[in-house]
Image (cartoon, helix red, strand yellow):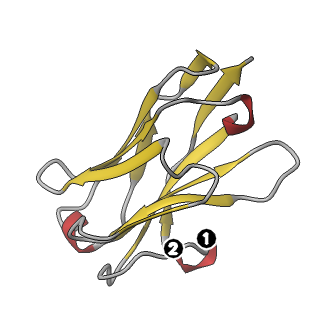
Amino acid sequence: QVQLVESGGGLVQAGGSLRLSCAASRHTFSSYTMGWFRQAPGKAREFVAGINSSGGITTYADSVKGRFTISRDNAENTVYLQMNSLRPEDTAIYYCAARGSGWRTYTQPGLYDYWGQGTQVTVSS
């Protein structure tokens, strides 16, 4: 079992930045693929960014490419999502997720084994 705890959400004006963190409970964190997803009210959960176990492969949704950066620190069991140039349409609850066998990234939420509780990001116009 892996417990994931997100932090760093909040209220920011359009054009601003936030950095989300997701701390994992397991010392085997370095073997997991990690992903960030988001869900806005009335919408399905959508993929935002993914990173493989080593950090050498990253994948982004088209809507966030060039603005968001996913990274990880395996020594600290933490994955990050740096969000720049935020837009009102980025408003959502952001979730981190983990999947074992992490040599590649995955965009489908159903392929992840563990989820955090989510952190709210609100971007005002």
Q: Quadrant of the C terminus?
A: top right
Residue under circle 2? 112
Question: Which label belongs to residue 63?
Answer: none
Q: Quadrant of the N terminus?
A: bottom left
Residue at figure coordinates x 32%, y 79% from the top left = 102
Disc 1 to disc 2: CB gap under 8 Å: yes
Decide: is 73 above or below 87: below
Q: Position of residue 122 (x, y in %)?
A: 66, 25
- Could you tell me if residue 24 is visible in this image? no
Instruction: Using the numbered discs, state the Cα–Cα distance from disc 1 to disc 2 in whole angstroms.
Output: 6 Å
Residue closest to the eye, 6 or 102: 102
Which residue ends up furthest to the front in the rendered image? 66
Residue type indicated by callout 1: Pro
Residue at figure coordinates x 59%, y 17% from the top left = 12
Residue closest to the eye, 35 or 99: 35
Residue 93 lies in quadrant: top right
Question: Which label belongs to residue 109?
Answer: 1
Residue 81 lies in quadrant: top left
